[in-house]
Amino acid sequence: MNTTQVKGNWNEQKGRLKQQFAVLADNDLMFEEGRKDKMLGKLQIKLGKTKEELDKINAAL
């Protein structure tokens, strides 16, 4: 998968997350290379979910 495909897939997932969780903003879903853990930590705090719950949500997308 090339960089364009990854970015496209992330944009689709980001849109679905924002639909499912209205409290999320673009800033909450900023994906930076090597900073996945930081983003997941922000989402855990904002949504009040565990890492396992976030993994299930991600798998459902």
Image (cartoon, rainbow, N blue to C red):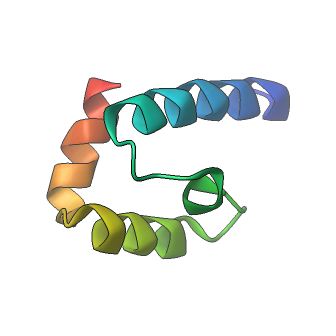
> What residue sits 34% from the left and 42% below the top?
21
Residue 24 rendering spot, x and y as whole percentages: 46, 52
Residue 31's place in the image compared with 9, above or below, is below
45, 4: nearer the viewer: 45
Q: Does residue 4 appear left or right of residue 24 in this picture? A: right
- Residue 59, image quadrant: top left
- Name the spot of residue 5 as percent of width and height, x first: 74, 23
Above or below, 49 against 53 in this view is below
Judge from the rendering whether residue 52 lies leftward or rightward of residue 14; answer left or right.
left
Looking at this rendering, what residue extends furthest in the front direction? 22
Who's the residue at 43% across and 72% down the image?
42
Front residue of this view, candidates 15 and 41: 15
Specify the quadrant of the image occupied by residue 51: bottom left
Query: Toward which corner of the image does residue 50 lie, by quadrant?
Result: bottom left
- Name the quarter where the N terminus is drawn: top right
- In x, y percent, where is residue 37? 47, 72
Count up the numbered dots: 0
Q: In front: 5, or 57?
A: 57
Q: Position of residue 15 (x, y in %)?
A: 54, 29
* Residue at figure coordinates x 16%, y 57% from the top left: 52
Q: Quadrant of the C terminus?
A: top left
Which residue is at a point 34% across and 68% down the rendered structure image? Answer: 46
Left or right, residue 14 beside residue 44: right
